[in-house]
């Protein structure tokens, strides 16, 4: 009997931000393959006896290869297993979702995608600000701060990213933000544009730092913290 895979968004880490559907899938799963940021109390919803398999990737740390993770999904499902692939935040936002569903499709294995609260929304909520504002911030854009090699992605649309009338959220920004900020400045974004650094969003040790694009670029150069983070910049970040 063929198994089935549920890609479940775990949100930023606070178990109270899980959807009801996410909790129900965890309770029913025979195996849960989880990211690092989806561990901890969220796994308490898994049923007793379920296989719990850590497959998370963290910058600068030993991590399983993507082809190994995909193979595990196929192997479990072919054994008739109900699998939850637990991804941090929302599975479709910088979560390598497409790589895994491509493999499942090729193997003829059924799947579903259950969205989660993205850390961008959670960070804005924690800071007490919206992501949009009439007449001032009509657009929200998400960008990753590093590519598969860990460097700043090439081919960025700097004209769009330097638009002060948008709210921009940079995922995984710490290692490359100094260079990114320099490119934004060259593209016309003022260095005093408000910026918010959000670390460990929704966790007990959450930290929010209100600053500017230029100041964060300078300060992060001396920051050796490996806490997961994002940076939100634009007019609303200073609210």
Image (cartoon, grey):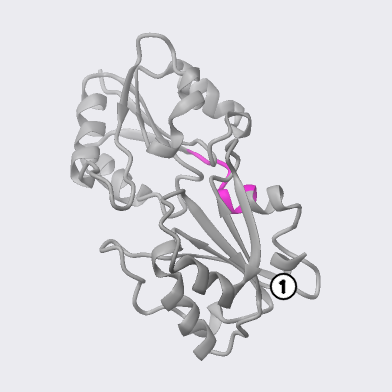
Nearer to the camera, 159 or 173: 173
Q: Which residue is mark 1?
A: 235
Q: Is residue 49 magenta?
A: no
User: Please, is residue 146 above or below residue 110 in the view?
Assistant: below
Q: Can you give x and y, in whole percent of width and height, for residue 2 in the image?
A: 26, 23
Where is residue 101? Give x, y as percent.
32, 44
Where residue 25 sits: x, y (%)? 48, 23
- The picture quadrant where one finds residue 138 is bottom right
Image quadrant where one finds the N terminus: top left
The magenta segment: 114-122
Q: Residue at x 45, y 61 (%)?
A: 223
Q: How many marks?
A: 1
Residue sitting at 33 percent across and 40 percent down?
Answer: 56
Write the residue at 57% across / 78% down.
214
Q: Can residue 140 be seen? A: no
- Residue 76 drawn at (x, y percent): 24, 25
The relative height of residue 80 versus residue 178 in the rendered view (above or below) is above
* Residue count near mark 1 (Cα–Cα under 10 Å), binned few <14, some 14–19, many ≥20: many
């Amino acid at each position: 009997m063929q198994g089935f895979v549920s890609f479940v968004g775990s949100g930023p880490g606070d178990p109270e931000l899980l959807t009801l559907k996410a909790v129900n899938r965890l309770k029913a799963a025979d195996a849960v393959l989880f990211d690092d940021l989806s561990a901890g109390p969220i796994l308490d919803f898994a049923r007793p006896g379920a296989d719990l398999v850590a497959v998370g990737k963290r910058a600068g740390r030993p991590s399983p290869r993507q082809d190994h993770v995909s193979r595990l999904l196929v192997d479990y499902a072919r054994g008739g297993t109900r699998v939850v692939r637990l991804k941090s935040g929302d599975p479709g936002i910088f979560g390598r979702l497409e790589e895994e569903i491509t493999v499942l499709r090729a193997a003829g294995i059924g799947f579903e995608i259950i969205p989660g609260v993205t850390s961008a929304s959670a960070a804005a909520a924690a800071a007490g600000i919206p992501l949009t504002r009439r007449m001032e911030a009509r657009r929200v854009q998400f960008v990753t701060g590093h590519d598969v090699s860990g460097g700043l992605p090439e081919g960025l649309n700097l004209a769009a990213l330097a638009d002060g009338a948008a709210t921009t959220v940079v995922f995984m920004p710490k290692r490359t933000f100094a260079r990114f900020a320099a490119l934004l400045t060259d593209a016309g974004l003022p260095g005093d544009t408000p910026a918010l650094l959000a670390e460990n969003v929704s966790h007990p040790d959450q930290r929010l730092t209100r600053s500017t694009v230029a100041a964060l670029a300078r300060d992060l150069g001396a920051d050796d913290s490996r806490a997961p983070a994002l940076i939100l910049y634009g007019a609303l970040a200073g609210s």
